[in-house]
Each structure stands twice: as C-alpha cells, then as structure tokens.
Amino acid sequence: MTTIRDVANHASVAPMTVSRVLNQPDSVSPETRERVEESIAALKYVPNMLGQGLRKKRTMALGLIVSDITNPFAIQQIRGVTRAARDNGYTVIFGHTESDPEEELKQLRALIERRVDGIILSPVYNTPESVNFVQGQKLPVTVLDYPMPENDVDVVRCDTHLAARELTDYVLDLGHRRVAMLSGDLAIVTARERAEGFEEAMAARGYSAPVEYGHFTPESGYEMALGVLQSESRPTALVTASNFIALGAAEAARELGLSIPEDLSIVTFDNARTDTVLDPFFTGVVQPIAEMATVATHFLLDRILQRYGGTGRDEILPTIFEVHRSTAPYGHS
C-alpha cells in the first residue's frame, strides 16, 4: 500500500508538504502542489482518513439506521442522507434493523465503535432507550420520522395524524360511509397516530371507525383486508397506514373478486411517487422523504460542527396529497 512517504519521495518533497497539500492546499505554492498532486495520481495514493480523523477528532463519517430496507421509504431515506452528507464532505455508514429494537441497539453500538461523528436514526419505536444510549456516549443524534416526547433531541417528521384525517375526509367526501382502517403495530407511534386521525375524522361525521392493527407488511395487509372485506357490513373504502399494507389489501380484494376502485376504494400513506413509478396507482399521502433526510442531515451537522447547541428541534414538514386510480366516488361503476 502506498504511503505518504512514498508520495513525498516521488515528488521530491517532505512528507509534511504532502500533508499540507492534502489538508491545507492554499499553504503550498502552486508549482509544488501540482507536483505533489501528480505524484498522488501516479502512485494511486489513498489518504488514511481514519488517521486524519483521529487527529482532528472527526472521522467525516455519519451513521444512519433504518428499520426496513425492503421498503422504498427506507431506500429514499438512505439516498437523501447520503446525498446531503456527500455535499458536505461526509460519507455514510448505514445499518438495517429489520424492525427489531434489540438489533437497533446492536447497530448503534457498532456505529459508535466505528467512531462515526453522529447518527441519524429512523427508530423502530419512539421510546427513549436508543436516543439515550447514543447521547450517553456524548454523540449527536437526529431522529427521522417519529416524535420523541421523552427525549431532548432533534426530530424531523410529518404530522401523520393530520394526514390520516385528510385521507379519511377525502373518501368520506367521495360518498363512502362504510370505511375501515388497516394500521400497523399498535406499539409503533405512527400506527397509532394514523389510526387516531382516522377515528377523529370518522367521529366528526358521526360514523363508526373500525380499526385493525397488524404490521407494516403486505402479508399483514392481506390478512387484515381478508377479514374486514368478508364481514357482513363490508367497507366500500379502506384507509391503510402504509403502501405495503395497501398492496396486501389490494391483493385480498382481487382474490375476493372485488374491483378497485369500482367495488373498493383504497387510500394509503407513502404511495409510490411519480419519479419512481411511471404509473402510480394508490391515492395517498406522500411524505417529502428527500427533504426530511436533508434537514435531518443538516441538523446533525449543526451539532457536530457546534453551529447549534440548544434544545431539541422538532421540524414538521407538510405532506403531499396525490390522487391516482385507487379511488372513486361511492356507487361509481
């Protein structure tokens, strides 16, 4: 492996000069800098960033923890954080917890052991343990997607309670009266928030609000939908708490011989955006994931670079409502 001394010998300069070219190029004359840069290119020298980072007490690496790598939502989180980090000279190391809180703590410990400068966390639950663990190591952390009422921590999220009301009001305005909600794990705050928003919207119109709790997976959406769609008072519309639940619900509807949207309207959260799918299907609420990731990264860098040292910020970004082909007025055929 090429060393900084090899570069210095090749360029006929001192190793300190090579270091200055890498870290303080303006302090070196243009002619010397050009000669050193040519030697770096010729020898394919790669600087030891870990060693430089330890000397500067920074590694220029950020950690990112996501819950479900199979979900496009998590993929967009990774892309957004990576782009924002790269624009600021940082690399990103990410971990995937498979929605397991114990694995989340293991991944956080691994990132801390690798001396990342800070961590962006999209947690399994919004309980305080994971944030407390990171902050206990004197490391800055920013939370994506969840409110964290028990922690003093920077958070970037959307108001999914309000968005659920918007979704529910939309299908009610289409004339649907028998509407059911398919949500995720009751222990997950967004599953509860979205169900509560649905219940409030239904109650405001004087209608009953049946809610099924399962998991944020197509399999769970399928099972929940099979149950409610075979009931005597079959709903004519479903409000689903995630795109994965919606996919499973649509499969169950087709299996039962129901057409979407003629027999059943479905609305959801985080339906595929037009920049990733040529022909989006589900009407729903879209969270601005790229913007959320960018804001979260900047919040974290504020802490790392000591540009901000106040109490935790709670940044709530607006959602986007998109109408596609999964909804129709009641009685439409």
Image: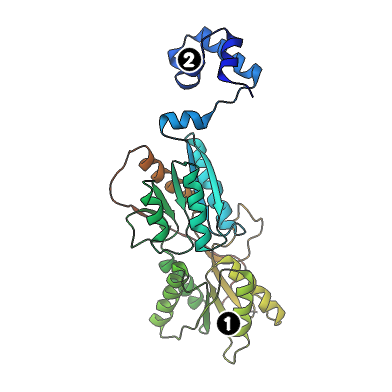
Residue 106 is left or right of residue 318, and the answer is right
Q: Which mark is residue 236?
A: 1
In front of the other: label 1 or label 2? 2
Residue at 52 percent of width and 12 percent of height: 33
**Whole-number angstrom distance, CA of label 1 to CA of label 2:** 74 Å
Say if residue 323 shows up in the picture.
yes
Residue at 54 percent of width and 48 percent of height: 94
Q: Quadrant of the N terminus?
A: top right
Residue type at mark 1 is Thr
Q: Do the CB atoms of the residues marked 1 and 2 lie less than 8 Å apart?
A: no
**Disc 2 residue crowd, few under 14, some 14–19, many 20+, Cα 10 Å:** few
**Disc 1 residue crowd, few under 14, some 14–19, many 20+, Cα 10 Å:** many
Q: Nearer the viewer, residue 118 or 283?
A: 118
Q: Which mark is residue 4?
A: none
> Where does residue 176 sit, x and y in percent of width and height?
52, 81
Residue 245 is left or right of residue 288, and the answer is right
Q: Does residue 134 sit above or below 7 in this rendering?
A: below
> Where does residue 213 sit, x and y in percent of width and height?
52, 77
The residue wearing badge 2 is 16
Residue 332 is left or right of residue 181, and the answer is right
Q: Quadrant of the C terminus?
A: bottom right
Q: Label 2's element?
A: helix
Q: Nearer the viewer, residue 60 or 155?
A: 60
Q: Label 1's element?
A: loop
> Most extreme residue toward the bottom, as rendered?
232
